[in-house]
Amino acid sequence: MEKRNPWAWIPSLYFAEGLPYVVVMTLSVIMYKRLGVSNTDIALFTSWLYFPWVIKPIWSPFVDLVKTKRWWIYSMQLLIGGGMAGVAFVLPGDFFLRFTLAFFWLMAFSSATHDIAADGFYMLGLTEEQQAFFIGIRNTFYRVAMLTGQGLLVMLAGLLEKSTGRISFAWSLVFFVLAGGFIALALWHKYILPRPASDAQRPNITPHTIFVEFGNTFVSFFSKKRIVPALLFMLTYRLGESQLVKLASPFLLDEREVGGLALSTGEVGFAYGTVGVISLLLGGVLGGMAISRNGLRAWLWPMALAISLPNLVYLYMAYAMPESLFIVNACVAIEQFGYGFGFTAYTMYLMLFAEGEYKTSHYAISTGFMALGMMLPGMISGWIQEQIGYQYFFIWVMICCLPLFVVLPFLRFKKE
């Protein structure tokens, strides 16, 4: 193996993995809201962008069999950078919605493919001891990408909106900055990533081989014991959150006349990208510590409550309409902390359920169902909100948290 210090590439690689996801899933929502797109269209179109992550397991074997994972990494990063530049070019035009969505789709497919290659390369480019040591480092820099996308870039957009007086031009500049940075990351990784001997294209791969492996993988997954409760768990665990996440930023940005809190772009960037991400990270760390000490069985119900009950802060804000930024930030912090703490149980369950001969593929299929559980409810969330208003919408979100607690008693754990 070509010797490279892992510190030279792991932080930047996982920053590059997290950034396009948060741009496609979160930054796009705020941008479209500032450009006057309706909540119905925002929720519908940006939820469709989950689709590449839903079907990611279908083409993951091709990433494993064709070319090297190193090649896939920097190639996908160049495509993502090109997609960001495309968004920047078309934003000032009259048909910005359809064209930016096309480039977001390009970024989403490239990012999902990049995830497959990066996670595989992590295992090939490090020894087992290094993998254990750097697991926390990679997760930290993934969260730093979230902080950058939800916080720093949104605040930058807010400053540019004020200084230029042109919203579309301000966001165009933000995406030009993103494009330049991501192309620089691609060039850096083409140079710095090691070349492990195990990262080589497999010989003698035929279409028949691929077809047989596909069949075995999916048949064995759907033949697992208690597959129905497991699938229901995957689809309901974030049923409320999947709708809340699409309307949280529009709620904070909307005028008070229509039930929003009328925050500025910069204020939303600070609330979600700084206070929110720090709370999310803290919740995730504490959740991991809790499960490592007592196991998932002991924490499943408390964590399910943690991901559901804090959504009540949005119901409170919709009725109380607080003007204090401190109260708004405190509410966002509570909700994000609960999400970080509760989400730990979700990922741990997926790993336990995937145990077996096709562990990697089964985990990928499980994450596909996880993305499906976010995509389908999110698509209709904007329409629901516009029909019933923010107050009743957040009541609806709380109702959507209830099916999870019907599923929980049917879950079983073979090992932890």
Image: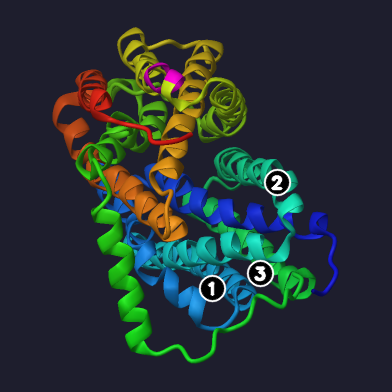
Q: Nearer the viewer, mark 3 or mark 2?
A: 2
Mark toward the start of the polypeptide (2 vs 1): 1
Q: Amino acid at mark 1?
A: Leu
Query: What separation in Å lies between label 3 and label 2 (alpha carbons)?
Result: 29 Å
| Nearest to the observer: residue 390 or residue 309 | 309
SS at circle 3: helix
- Res 38 visible: no
Instruction: Give the left or right position of residue 11, taking residue 92 as reference.
Output: right
Pick out the residue farthest to the left: 387
150 relative to 393, above or below: below
Q: Main secondary structure of the magenta part?
A: helix
- Res 152 visible: yes
Q: Which residue is the site of mark 2?
A: 132
SS at circle 1: helix
Question: Residue 79 has which mark?
Answer: 1
Q: Quadrant of residue 49?
A: bottom left
